[in-house]
Amino acid sequence: MTSSRNCTLTLPYAIWFTLIGLMVYGDAWAQRNRRVARERSPRQELIYDNHSYLPVIRSVQFHPQGEEAALPVIDMGAPSPLLLSFDDLRGDVRNYYYSIEHCTHDWQSSNLSPLEYVEGFNEDRVMTFQSSVNTLQAYTNYQLELPSRQVKPKLAGNYLLKVYEDADKRRLVLTQRFYVVRPVFSVLGEIVPSNNTMKRASNQKINLTVQTGSQVVNNPHQQVQVLVMQNQRPDVQMWIRSPSHMQEGTIQYRDMATLDFAGGNEFRYVDLRSLRLASERVREIYRDSLIQVELMPDQATAGQSYGSLFDEDGAFYLDNQDRPHAPEESDYAQVRFKLALDPQASDRLNENSLAQSGIYVVGAFNHYQRTAENRLQYNSETDQWEVTLPLRQGLYNYEYVLEEPDSGFSPFHFSGSYFQTGNTYQVLVYFRRPGTTWDEIAAYQLLRSRD
């Protein structure tokens, strides 16, 4: 039997140990929460472009559901959802939210109120996520569909999708452009050799006819403008604002000097669907703390005869042939790209390095953007230009581009340009109705130079 005297003696000890526990674990709890607070995504300046604001945001895909290589377009006449997917290499679970903003044809804010361009609320939480399993590189994959129950665009035009942390729109992690079309016009197009005899072997000329139907267009020069992109590339696109011919119900853009694109060449590719067996473009795969992949050196092909090769017009596909559950069991690899140039070309580029010359590896996987991360550096030991990028398992199209201070940007400097090249062209027709202050997209058409 326990005496009352023993009970009164043990009570102070219990309180004492409780206080010690609160001090020790409370301090650990406070430190953990301070650490979490420091690890929140930092505040960013908004960029009206396809942009990942943190290096840990990878493998961004934004496309119509079931069409991984298609432009993110919502047709208000027959709407189908867009799917956004991205990885966060921090590997934890974050509270991500998203909203959309209506933009002008040249990607500035249209300054409309969200009440004017959104049905419902203009914010929703990203609820679908999945952590990686059995991978050396931990990551969490997030997905969302647009339109959602909360967020539905109701005006045609350019839109910017913003993804941010903890409902704080300044803590941006990702922005993506997409397009909403109200099909009041239709587009007919053809791809022919260039009218310039010096470019007939290298260029693809596009002629367009816009049919306005019952829509009245009083001044096509001011109300209508057309954007044509090659392979969804923001670095290879052209605007046209002056029609060559007009008549009732039709606007023609067939001027000899406009929409004359260098055909380029077929994209280079690498198959990374398996990190166990090397594909034809892979020289070596080895494991360190992460998987390392060394590719075969690429050669400059400009000046050579055109060779037909099937490609995906710059797209990339995430896939895994090593494991049955591709979405969560695909791993990342550090992939080393190599470009071998003749000594004279390398010497000239090295001489211009102080003047900001640069070779970049680009594709849809990095939105064709030229940054310090994907800029190649000269390796004097191998006499090659090299860069290493983290890529998730999949099939990738890519190309090397050159930027020089004197001659400017050259997308086909290393690959050459040929009329026979298979390309896709995305045609967007912008229309400003009388009395409005924003640009609608009145038509969208996809053209192929070779089926």
Image (tube, rainbow, N blue to C red):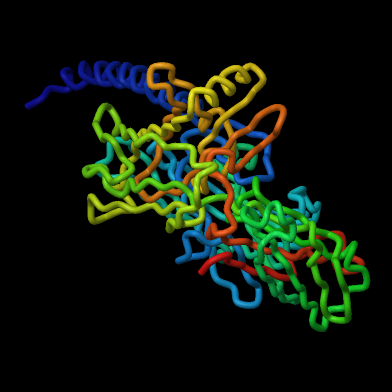
Displayed quadrant of residue 334: top left
Displayed quadrant of residue 225: bottom right
The one nearer the camera, 235 or 130, is: 235
The one nearer the camera, 15 or 261, is: 261
* Residue found at x 65% / y 45%: 235
Residue sitting farthest toward the left: 1
In the rendered image, residue 75, in percent from the top left (x then y), is placed at: 63, 71
* Residue found at x 71% / y 72%: 182
Whether residue 66 appears in this view of the structure is yes
* Residue found at x 51% / y 32%: 374
* Residue found at x 40% / y 40%: 391
In the rendered image, residue 447, in percent from the top left (x then y), is placed at: 61, 67
**How many numbered markers are drawn?**
0
Q: Quadrant of the N terminus?
A: top left
Q: Is 253 placed above or below 340 here?
A: below
The one nearer the camera, 405 or 323, is: 405
Query: Is 75 on the left or on the right of 305, as rendered?
Result: right
In the rendered image, residue 380, in percent from the top left (x then y), is placed at: 43, 17
Query: Is 307 on the left or on the right of 442, as rendered?
Result: left
Q: Is 370 placed above or below 85 here?
A: above
Whether residue 362 appears in this view of the structure is no
In the rendered image, residue 105, in percent from the top left (x then y), is placed at: 77, 55
Q: Is 68 placed above or below 267 here?
A: below
